[in-house]
Image (spheres, rainbow, N blue to C red):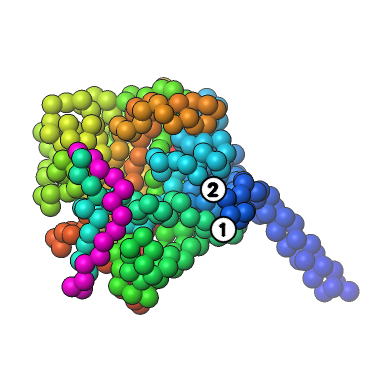
């Protein structure tokens, strides 16, 4: 009898535990695609009340609510109120971009002696290039999402199979992205992929952040630190030249915390070509996940640390936001009202053998981890 009661008690405790863990992930229907397929949205809530919303469409981070120094919660990301906005978006708000995030010159690369041609869907400086996976990159496809749990964290695992030849890329790619929100106020984006043929890959996360919680305010007062002693200069098409240049003595130096707007309009070639910051910084070498960036909004007190295992981070100061995108709560996003910190391999790496390789071969597993740690 005593043993039976113990088993019953354990079963009851297990049931209560499952109910408790299930309550910190809400799953709902977010909408439908034109072909009728249903799109789900997952709301993750940690023990401190932070929330992160993720949708299956584009493996997109829809929103993140974090407190300021007074405890007031606000969404610190740009985006849309409904699925319809994401379906027509051209700014990659919150998206998982790929198969190759960032730019590939002229939409061409050679792998194992064979040239591949991709869509040219971007033209900075009037020079065509391939951007963020093409006309229908990973940000514009339906992933399959499932709630997941581990000790002290809740998440959603999203999977997608990219067919051989999709957007011009070789190899069938099995991709998985998992978002984790833990009780240390860390939001983790973890990507992995395998292929059946040699291919190139550079998955990246593309959230626009505004830590003020008010997207009508510019991010130029945000204070930024980048753990980088050098960056990749570009040509007028914003393609890396292959040079690795020191940041010392230039407006690209964020080794000490500096306001984003302090030098964004400086008379400096890299800034003039991009209309502001839109470059890859070369992170200091280290093993595993390490600090890449720290951003602080002095008014709200919100601070965000970015950590990664990748060699670079693309800092983009929202130069091309122009008020035509109507976002959350009807706000028209103006220039520099959001900033991106995209941890990544180097842009145009398939055309630069001197860069860290972007090639993935059968039997290998691509992995990319980005950690966003919130403080106030």
Mark 1 Cα shell of 10 Å, populated few (<14), some (14-19), many (≥20):
many
Q: Secondary structure at mark 1?
A: strand
Between 269 and 322, the one lying in front of the other is: 322
Query: Is residue 87 positioned above or below 144 on the image?
Result: above
Q: Is residue 255 visible?
A: no
Is disc 2 in contact with disc 1, using a CB cutoff of under 8 Å?
A: yes
Q: Work out whether 81 lies above or below 331.
A: below
| Residue ID for mark 2 | 54
**Label disc, if present, on residue 36 of the rendered structure:** none
Image location (x, y in percent) of residue 3: 82, 74
In reply to whether residue 155 is colored magenta, the answer given is: no
Dividing the picture into quadrants, the one containing residue 148 is bottom right
Task: Report the residue at 58% width, 54% height from top.
Answer: 35
Q: Which residue range is magenta in the image?
A: 112-125
Task: Locate residue 37 relative to residue 166 in the image: left or right.
Answer: right
Residue sticking out furthest to the front? 35
Residue at image point 17% right, 49% down: 240
Residue drawn at (65%, 49%), measured in percent from left and top?
29
Q: Which residue is mark 1?
A: 145
Q: Say if 266 sits above or below 180 in the image.
A: above
- Looking at the figure, which quarter contains the C terminus? top left
Q: Is 115 displayed left or right of 90 in the figure?
A: left
Q: Is residue 299 left or right of residue 64?
A: left
- Looking at the image, tell me whether mark 2 or mark 1 is earlier in sequence order: 2
**Secondary structure at numbered mark 2:** strand
- Residue 211: % across, % down: 43, 31
Q: CA distance from mark 2 to mark 1?
A: 9 Å
Q: Position of residue 108 (x, y in %)?
A: 22, 59
x and y percentages locating residue 274 in the rendered image: 22, 36
């Amino acid at each position: 009898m005593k043993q039976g009661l113990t088993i019953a008690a354990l079963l009851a405790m297990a049931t209560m535990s499952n109910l408790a863990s299930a309550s910190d992930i809400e799953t709902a229907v977010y909408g439908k695609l034109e072909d009728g397929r249903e799109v789900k949205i997952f709301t993750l809530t940690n023990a401190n009340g932070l929330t992160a919303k993720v949708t299956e469409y584009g493996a997109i981070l829809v929103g993140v609510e974090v407190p300021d120094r007074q405890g007031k919660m606000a969404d610190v990301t740009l985006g849309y109120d409904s699925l319809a906005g994401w379906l027509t978006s051209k700014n990659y708000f919150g998206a998982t971009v790929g198969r190759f995030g960032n730019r590939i010159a002229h939409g061409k690369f050679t792998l194992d002696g064979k040239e591949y041609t991709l869509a040219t869907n971007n033209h900075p400086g009037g020079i065509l290039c391939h951007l963020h996976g093409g006309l229908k990159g990973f940000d514009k496809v339906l992933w399959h999402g499932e709630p997941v749990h581990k000790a002290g964290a809740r998440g959603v695992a999203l999977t997608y199979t990219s067919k051989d030849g999709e957007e011009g890329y070789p190899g069938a790619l099995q991709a998985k992205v998992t978002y984790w929100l833990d009780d240390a106020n860390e939001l983790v984006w973890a990507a992995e992929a395998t292929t059946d043929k040699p291919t190139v890959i550079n998955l990246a996360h593309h959230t626009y952040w505004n830590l003020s919680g008010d997207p009508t305010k510019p991010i130029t007062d945000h204070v930024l630190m980048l753990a980088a002693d050098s960056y990749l200069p570009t040509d007028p098409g914003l393609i890396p030249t292959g040079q690795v240049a020191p940041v010392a003595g230039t407006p690209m130096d964020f080794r000490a915390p500096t306001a984003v707007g302090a030098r964004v309009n400086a008379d400096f070639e890299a800034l003039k070509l991009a209309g502001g910051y839109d470059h890859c910084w070369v992170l200091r070498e280290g093993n595993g996940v390490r600090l890449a960036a720290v951003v602080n909004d002095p008014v709200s007190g919100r601070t965000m640390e970015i950590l990664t295992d990748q060699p670079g981070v693309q800092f983009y100061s929202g130069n091309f936001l122009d008020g035509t995108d109507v976002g959350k709560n009807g706000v028209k996003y103006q220039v520099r009202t959001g900033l991106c910190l995209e941890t990544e391999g180097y842009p145009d790496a398939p055309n630069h053998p001197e860069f860290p390789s972007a090639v993935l071969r059968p039997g290998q597993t691509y992995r990319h981890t980005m950690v966003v740690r919130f403080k106030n």
